Image (cartoon, rainbow, N blue to C red):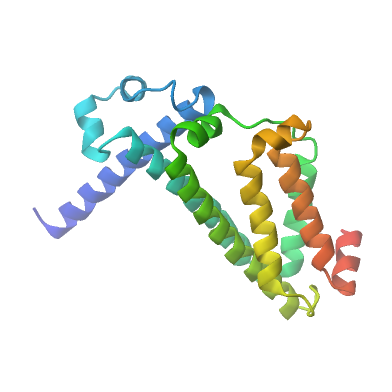
Amino acid sequence: MSKKSCTFAAVLSQDQQVHIIKTAGEMFFRLGIRSVSIDDICRELGMSKKTFYVYFSSKDELIEQLLQANLNYISGKMEELLALRDFRKLVKVFLKHQEAEKNDVRRVPQLVYDLKKYYPQQFADFQIKCFETQKGYIMRYLEMGVSQGLVRADLNIELIAVLFAKIHSDAIRDFEIIEAHNHNMHQLAHTAMDVLVRGTLSEEGLKLFNNE
């Protein structure tokens, strides 16, 4: 087989793997992880179990790949925003996002319940990765704002990044406590982001924020 053919085959293989992850993820989100078997996934895909096992050795591996894919998606979106290299545009995007989600009343999907209860190690590993990823992006966001005079220069950027990444991480882990108080993760994330933005802006940054 030629090098070109090998590359084409690898792309097809990767596409199939992504398709399986996407389909399984949608099923897990709707029904929960425990309620969906490999047989169910294969039936939904019109695929044999033999073919499924070409791509994943187990359901556990599928879940790990699904969590990684979710993290990759979030990272991709954040990279797109930071690539703007314009803090003013980031503030505008933030405001648009705030408006879209201000009335969000969604509760945690069954998928998260099942992850926490039945896949604690995968869940814990995912939380650590999310924390480190978010910390890194928050630091870059703040550093960009400082360099453009729109974020306060007197802040301990790393400490602030740790604080807000921890808030989000704890919200995922302790969602039962939040929901017991008639709130949800989305509302907490919305409020934390609002505090992060307003609390770190310089005087010029606040003028921009209020004008927008």
For the point 54% across and 34% down, which residue is it? 112
> Where's residue 40, x and y in %?
35, 20
> Where's residue 48, x and y in %?
23, 24
Q: In which quarter of the view is residue 49 placed?
A: top left
In the picture shown, does residue 49 fall above or below 65? above
For the point 30% across and 22% down, which residue is it? 46
In the picture shown, does residue 186 fall above or below 151? above
Q: In which quarter of the view is residue 7 placed?
A: bottom left
Quadrant that contains the C terminus: bottom right
- Whether residue 150 sits left or right of residue 176 in the image: it is right
Q: Residue furthest left?
A: 1
Q: In which quarter of the view is residue 44 placed?
A: top left
The answer to whether residue 19 shows anywhere in this view is no
The answer to whether residue 90 shows anywhere in this view is yes
> Where's residue 169, x and y in %?
61, 50
Q: Nearer the viewer, residue 155 or 177?
A: 177
Q: Nearer the viewer, residue 78 or 106?
A: 106
For the point 33% across and 43% down, which residue is it? 15
> Where's residue 186, x and y in %?
70, 40
In the picture shown, does residue 178 fall above or below 85? above
In the picture shown, does residue 125 fall above or below 133? above
